[in-house]
């Protein structure tokens, strides 16, 4: 990896104090590293923060705080099961969302405002603001309740190598006890966000699909 690439990716993956340490770590990565993901979440009393490096034949997970690492062989089916359990077991989401629901569409600025006002306004006021932003009255009620009563929240900062260089993708997720949400949003100058209801099985399947087959994160 080139120096300018390591700087760009480290700023994206670790916008906090560990950025400089990560730059050197990225420079030393093997040439067959083509996907990097930071998975960070809190769920109830559980917190997890991992940097995940996807190589041709294995996946390596590193805890940034302790530098402890774990390796999983992609040719080993049992290893894949253990890997998924290790990464995602602590995330509390409803097991499955029945039926298909359209995504709620809004701007990142509108979502930031929803998060800001959620602590101080009533559930009905929050629902009204979300419906105003999205035009969807049914899903706005579910989204407002999940924002207001969230017990799980996390983010995925994803870097993927292609022939044109490295592409960046940001996603986050949160849930109350009745509904989980996967949020995909723009990076850089664009300003869009889509929020889709997601269950634990859907979330795990989408995450594993990305790890193994380089597909965008989507439920």
Image (spheres, rainbow, N blue to C red):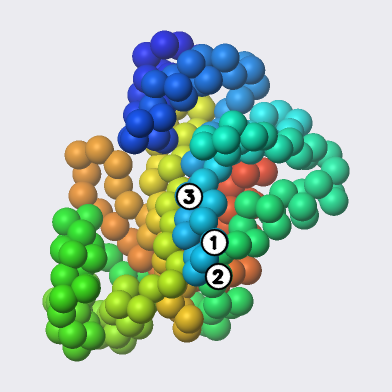
Q: Earlier in the sequence, mark 2 or mark 3?
A: 3
Classify mark 2: residues with Cα within 10 Å, few (<14), some (14-19) or many (20+): many
Nearer the observer: mark 3 or 1; the answer is 1
Instruction: Relative to 163, say whether 151 is above or below.
Output: below
Residue underneath mark 3: 40
Residue underneath mark 1: 46
The residues bearing labels 1 and 2 have C-alpha atoms spaced at a distance of 9 Å
Q: Earlier in the sequence, mark 1 or mark 2?
A: 1
Residues 153 and 127: in front is 153
Q: Count the numbered circles shown.
A: 3
Taking the view exactly as shown, the residue that stands out farthest to the top is 3
Q: Is residue 219 left or right of residue 75?
A: left
Residue 215 seen in render: no
Q: Give the residue at x 62% y 44%.
A: 211
Which quadrant of the figure has residue 9? Answer: top left
Indicate which disc residue 90 carries. none
Q: Earlier in the sequence, mark 3 or mark 1?
A: 3
Q: Secondary structure at mark 3?
A: strand
Classify mark 1: residues with Cα within 10 Å, few (<14), some (14-19) or many (20+): few
Q: Is residue 163 left or right of residue 74?
A: left
Image coords of residue 167 (percent x, y): 42, 32
Residue 169 seen in render: yes
Residue underneath mark 2: 92
Residues 135 and 171: in front is 171
């Amino acid at each position: 990896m080139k120096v300018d690439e390591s700087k760009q990716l480290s700023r994206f993956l670790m916008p906090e104090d560990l950025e400089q340490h990560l730059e050197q770590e990225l420079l030393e990565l093997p040439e067959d590293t083509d996907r990097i993901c930071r998975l960070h979440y809190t769920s109830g009393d559980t917190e997890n923060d991992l940097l995940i490096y996807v190589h041709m034949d294995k996946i390596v997970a590193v805890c940034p705080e302790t530098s402890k690492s774990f390796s999983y062989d992609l040719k080993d089916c049992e290893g894949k099961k253990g890997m998924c359990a290790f990464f995602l077991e602590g995330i509390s989401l409803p097991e499955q969302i029945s039926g298909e629901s359209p995504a709620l569409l809004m701007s990142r600025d509108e979502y930031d405002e929803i998060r800001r006002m959620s602590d101080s306004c009533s559930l009905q006021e929050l629902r009204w603001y979300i419906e105003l932003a999205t035009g969807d009255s049914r899903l706005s009620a579910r989204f407002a309740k999940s924002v207001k009563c969230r017990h799980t929240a996390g983010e995925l900062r994803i870097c993927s190598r292609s022939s044109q260089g490295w592409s960046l993708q940001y996603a986050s997720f949160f849930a109350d006890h009745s509904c989980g949400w996967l949020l995909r949003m723009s990076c850089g100058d664009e300003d869009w966000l889509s929020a889709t209801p997601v269950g634990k099985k859907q979330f795990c399947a989408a995450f594993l699909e990305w790890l193994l087959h380089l597909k965008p994160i989507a439920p």
